[in-house]
């Protein structure tokens, strides 16, 4: 059994033994009665001090009683030492032990966190040993602790004696029963134990080493559990096994009650999975980022002295500037009718309107009457509901895009892929190149594709400036060739997978939706868990943002979507002429 040491294995030395003064131990007559140190032991202690700890317990009255080590104590007294190392339980040197020759565990699991915990906290569970013929001290139970202690640089292990008459069959049965009797802490139990340790005064580094987690994870846990609102959110979904990443997300939204409630509700649902919670977090992050961007744009417009209006304040003649004929947004900047209205479809900016195109000499599209002429209250409400649905759908789409692209980037960066996954990547690359069915010629070298590809490859801003240098910045390992080639195909498909793909209302675009659905099939075959909006596109079904399904669950490379009742036909934008929206064209091209 071999184990390669890591940087974590050698970072710190084992913790020293605690000490007691020789005077305190010698003050108790029972510790020094009629005991003389052998000459060789006295010489060694005089030269090197006491290296083997004394086994000492506290009796009634808090008196230290030496159970093992009286000769060493006598030598320490004779040598004039001030202190000696002690241990509150029996320990034995590792180098006198022999591991069981037929240990049942094939994989001892000597991970860096396990070894680090032994190094910093010592071995807390005694190994069970047995004396065999010839004086061999065999480890019957605790071989993982034995090897881990060696890796951690421990010199001793706590021990207890096994039955001297335990036969070989009994030893193997003990391996079974002791393994079955052990149960690891659940994530929630582990989190609670770490927080309790912090409350009891343990430092972050010590907790992290003992638990085998990052210090930043411990800090996140302590921050969340110390905050009344966040701790209540965690308790509100007590059956959910909160990950450190999701706890950190809760902390992000500590001041956003609506987002906090949405995340907590997702975690509290029956059989909630990490993917379900991750999906809600992604949506809430997207909403937050858009809100921040819109607020920044508004502040910029106000600082420039621009006029801002609510959509309800506009007259029926008002029209977005992009719909005017013969004038650009830049040219319209000097128009006295210029006002800015919040763009509900994008939700991260304001768009320019002309409050009265006819009054200020602008040409409007034939058959257009500004905001649509006089409408009944029911029509106005229907349009408002349709716009709200599109806004929610766009937010879900953008959230899904963020999750999807991160997953693709992680796939591309992985050093080792299963053979089946590699073959699937190669198959898709071949299909794209040989069948010409992926828009490679038209879109491979366009600027949006280049930007997406740079992100997939993990290039920095400077490296991303020159597309011709991309190959020189990536790993030269030929085994990664399928991933790198796939990254270019993926960048093309992502460039073309625009918001138009999810729409099934008046703004539907089958020329975008169908190839995007095929692209999602490719990703699902690679193990990507589709979000609800992506699943609807792949299935060719309308998407209702108010009836979000859980994320799909994958097993290996074969995805399996959770079945939920079908959704109703969604409401769309009321104005069919908005198909001429250059913003829509921009989305399709960007």
Image: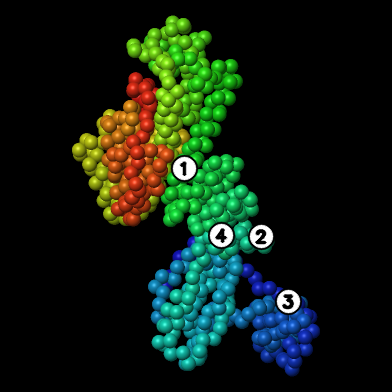
Residue 347, x across and y down, in percent: 48, 30
Residue at the disc numbered 2: 199
Sequence-wise, the earlier of marks 4 and 1 is 4
Asked if labels 4 and 2 touch by Cβ distance under 8 angstroms, the answer is no
Label 1's element?
helix
- Tell me how far mark 1 sits from mark 3, CA to CA: 56 Å
Instruction: Answer few, some or many: residues within 10 Å of disc 1's Cα (few below 14, many 20 plus, some between 14 and 19).
Output: many
Q: Measuring 52% from the left and 22% from the top, which residue is drawn there? A: 310
Asked whether the viewer can see residue 491, the reply is no
Separation (CA) of disc 3 from disc 2: 28 Å
Which one is in front, 156 or 249? 249
Q: Name the residue under label 1.
A: 282
Q: Nearer the viewer, mark 1 or mark 3?
A: 1
Query: Secondary structure under badge 3?
Result: strand
Count up the numbered dots. 4
Instruction: Please name the residue that numbered disc 4 is placed on.
Output: 191
Alpha carbons under labels 2 and 4: distance apart: 12 Å
Point out residue 414 in the picture as x, y percentages from the top left corner. Answer: 38, 50
């Amino acid at each position: 059994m071999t184990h390669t040491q890591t940087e974590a294995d050698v970072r710190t030395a084992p913790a020293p033994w605690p000490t007691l003064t020789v005077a305190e131990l010698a003050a108790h007559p029972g510790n020094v009665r009629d005991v003389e140190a052998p000459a060789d032991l006295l010489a060694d202690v005089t030269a090197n001090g006491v290296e083997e700890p004394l086994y000492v317990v506290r009796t009634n009255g808090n008196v230290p009683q030496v159970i093992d080590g009286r000769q060493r104590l006598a030598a320490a007294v004779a040598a004039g030492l001030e202190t000696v190392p002690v241990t509150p339980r029996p320990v034995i040197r590792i180098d006198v032990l022999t591991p069981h020759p037929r240990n049942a565990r094939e994989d001892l699991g000597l991970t860096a966190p396990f070894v680090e915990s032994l190094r910093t906290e010592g071995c807390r569970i005694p190994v069970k040993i047995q004396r065999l013929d010839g004086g061999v001290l065999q480890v019957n139970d605790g071989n993982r602790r034995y090897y881990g202690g060696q890796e951690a640089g421990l010199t001793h292990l706590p021990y207890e004696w096994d039955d001297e008459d335990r036969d070989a069959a009994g030893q193997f049965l003990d391996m079974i029963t002791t393994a079955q009797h052990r149960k690891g802490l659940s994530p929630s139990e582990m989190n609670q134990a770490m927080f309790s340790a912090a409350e009891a005064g343990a430092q972050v580094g010590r907790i992290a080493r003992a638990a085998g987690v990052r210090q930043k994870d411990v800090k996140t846990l302590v921050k969340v559990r110390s905050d009344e609102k966040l701790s209540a959110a965690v308790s509100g979904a007590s059956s959910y096994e909160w990950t450190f990443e999701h706890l950190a997300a809760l902390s992000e939204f500590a001041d956003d009650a609506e987002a906090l409630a949405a995340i907590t509700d997702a975690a509290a649902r029956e059989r909630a999975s990490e993917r379900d919670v991750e999906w809600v977090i992604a949506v809430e992050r997207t909403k937050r980022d858009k809100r921040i961007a819109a607020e920044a744009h508004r502040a910029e417009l106000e600082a420039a002295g621009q006029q801002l209006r609510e959509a309800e304040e506009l007259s029926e003649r008002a029209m977005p500037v992009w719909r005017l004929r013969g004038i650009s947004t830049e040219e319209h900047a000097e128009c006295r009718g210029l006002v800015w209205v919040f763009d509900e479809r994008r939700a991260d900016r304001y768009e320019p309107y002309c409050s009265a195109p006819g009054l200020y000499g602008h040409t409007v599209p034939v058959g257009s009457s500004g905001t649509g002429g006089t409408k009944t209250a029911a029509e106005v409400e229907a349009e408002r509901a349709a716009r709200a649905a599109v806004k929610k759908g766009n937010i879900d789409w953008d959230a899904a895009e963020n999750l999807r692209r991160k997953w693709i980037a992680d796939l591309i960066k992985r050093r080792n892929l299963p053979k089946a996954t590699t073959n699937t990547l190669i198959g898709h690359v071949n299909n794209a190149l040989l069948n010409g069915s992926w828009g490679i010629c038209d879109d491979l070298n366009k600027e949006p594709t280049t930007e997406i590809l740079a992100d997939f490859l993990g290039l920095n801003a400077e490296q991303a400036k020159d597309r011709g240098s991309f190959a020189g910045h990536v790993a030269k390992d030929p085994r990664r060739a399928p991933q790198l080639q796939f990254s270019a195909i993926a960048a093309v498909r992502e460039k073309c997978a625009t918001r138009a793909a999810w729409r099934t209302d008046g703004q539907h675009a089958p020329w975008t939706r169908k190839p995007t659905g095929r692209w999602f099939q490719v990703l699902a075959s690679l193990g990507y868990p589709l979000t609800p909006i992506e699943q609807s596109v792949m299935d060719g079904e309308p998407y209702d943002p108010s009836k979000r399904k859980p994320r799909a669950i994958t097993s290996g490379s074969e995805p399996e979507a959770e079945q939920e009742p079908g959704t109703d036909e969604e409401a769309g934008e009321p104005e069919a002429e908005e198909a001429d929206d250059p913003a829509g064209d921009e989305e399709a091209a960007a």
